[in-house]
Amino acid sequence: MSRRLQAPRGTFDVLGDAAQARAELERVARQILERAGYERAETPVFEATELFARGVGASTDIVQKEMYSFDDGGGRSLTLRPEGTAPICRAYIEHGMHKRPQPVKLWYMGPFFRAEAPQAGRYRQFAQIGAEAIGSDDPAVDAESILLLAELLEAVGARETRLRISSLGTPAMRAAYREELAAYLRAHEHELSAEVRGRIELNPLRAFDADHPGTRRVMDAAPRLLDRLSPEDVEHFGAVRELLDAAGLAYEIDTTLVRGLDYYTRTVFEFTSDALGAQSGVGGGGRYDGLVEQIGGPPTPGMGWAAGVERILLASPPRPTAPPPVDLYVAYAKAELRHQAFVLAADARRAGWAAQVELGGRSLKGQLKAAGRAGARYVAILGDEGMSLKDMESGEQRVVPPDTVIHHLKNGFA
Ligand code: AMP
């Protein structure tokens, strides 16, 4: 006997109610984002590895250890996309979208891949909904982008969400701040966890994320990026906050907020849910004013976010999903009538009705049971004496000509 195979670790199948819940989430996201003028975009699931392993980005956690990269057989390295922003920027450049009215607003939903240690809420293949607005550095872009994710989370009833925001300033001042922070960390090296110590040069900002008590004590007194912002960045951040305040959206300013991807500039934000366990991040993002240029495009500002589909669903109450309606079930009494039944169901579907025909070779009695289980409104029964149509709700049954079925689906027996 062959070995029974299972889905790989960190992956899962989406079936039944879970599939319905995802479709419903996608519908709500589409409605909210398209109302704000975001257009749907789809990019390939794999890209050239260098799109994700760029100079500056090379120190991010994802690039360091979490990418599924492979040789395409011709000596080129491809990578299953770990995130959506760089591919959308690649598409923006490739399709000359800088010539369109700015900002160009795109949204997506699809699978992403990270070779992480699986745990509750953390998978190796997961889905993200994302929204990117490329081509404007107006603080209103930042505020609206954040508001749209807030709206989505509210619309699906995500529980106990919190929004934290911060500003990371410009790349130049961030570089200077990194040096300052690295020097500070080196001065306190013996108090830090080994992991943080090993990353002082690579990514000192991540030290703010550490749980290690000694490291936390050191970080409480560490210099804060927010205190080093340039006047322009302070102004930009202030304008974003004013717009969020005007929209009545509650947030906390978190000077230690750092994101896993280090192309961010200025505004960064994250929504968490206290209803989730250790993996509490529901979605987040920020401004990435240098990214388009980094991947070979003209200097172009950008702002966006990505939210985890599974996390949103985990944080939201299950919505009762109605089974899809069945208007007509076509049953037949003997094999000779199968063709006629088959065509009748196909005709009903073409006319816009939900119609099924017996596919399991069941007896007439079995077929009627199946029709009941499916919740069919009407059952057509083809027999030697022609066709009878049964209204399953009232129980009324009439002998009618087969070509009147669609009329009756619409008008009942009236
Ligand atoms: P990131 O691109 O890292 O900012 O992630 C954005 C969102 O995607 C997170 O807030 C999570 O909701 C979700 N996410 C990221 N990584 C995973 C993963 N491995 N499994 C499930 N969801 C994830």
Image (spheres, rainbow, N blue to C red):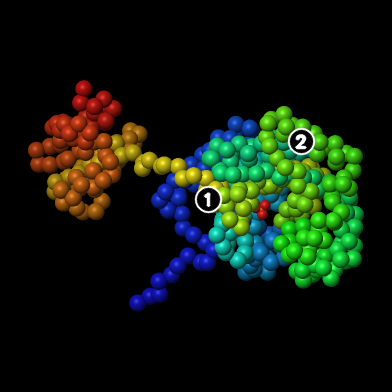
Q: Is residue 217 left or right of residue 118?
A: right
x and y percentages locating residue 225 in the rendered image: 84, 50
Name the amino acid type tagged 1. Answer: Leu
Viewer-side residue, 73 vs 374? 374
User: Which residue: 26% across, 51% down?
Assistant: 359
Q: Is residue 7 left or right of residue 50?
A: left
Label 2–label 1 contact, CB within 8 A: no
Tell me, yes or no, if residue 50 can be seen here: no
Viewer-side residue, 188 vs 98? 188
| Location of residue 399 (image quadrant) | top left
Q: Is 68 rendered above or below residue 267?
A: below
Identify residue for label 2.
241
Quadrant assignment for the N terminus: bottom left
Residue at the bottom extreme?
Answer: 1
Name the amino acid type tagged 2. Answer: Arg
x and y percentages locating residue 159 in the rendered image: 56, 44
- Which of the marked residues, 2 or 1, is nearer the chain's N terminus? 2
The residue carrying pointer 1 sits among few (fewer than 14), some (14 to 19) or many (20 or more) residues within 10 Å by Cα, namely some
User: Which residue: 45% across, 49% down?
Assistant: 19
x and y percentages locating residue 316 in the rendered image: 52, 45
Q: Is 64 rendered above or below residue 36?
A: below
The residue carrying pointer 2 sits among few (fewer than 14), some (14 to 19) or many (20 or more) residues within 10 Å by Cα, namely many
Whole-number angstrom distance, CA of label 2 to CA of label 1 = 29 Å
Tell me, yes or no, if residue 69 can be seen here: yes
Q: Is residue 55 left or right of residue 63?
A: right
| Location of residue 182 (image quadrant) | bottom right
Viewer-side residue, 288 vs 404? 288
x and y percentages locating residue 110 in the rendered image: 57, 50
Indicate if the residue with disc 2 has its beta carbon within 8 Å of ligand 1: no
Identify residue for label 1.
314
Mark 1, secondary structure of its residue: helix
Ligand 1: quadrant of the figure:
bottom right
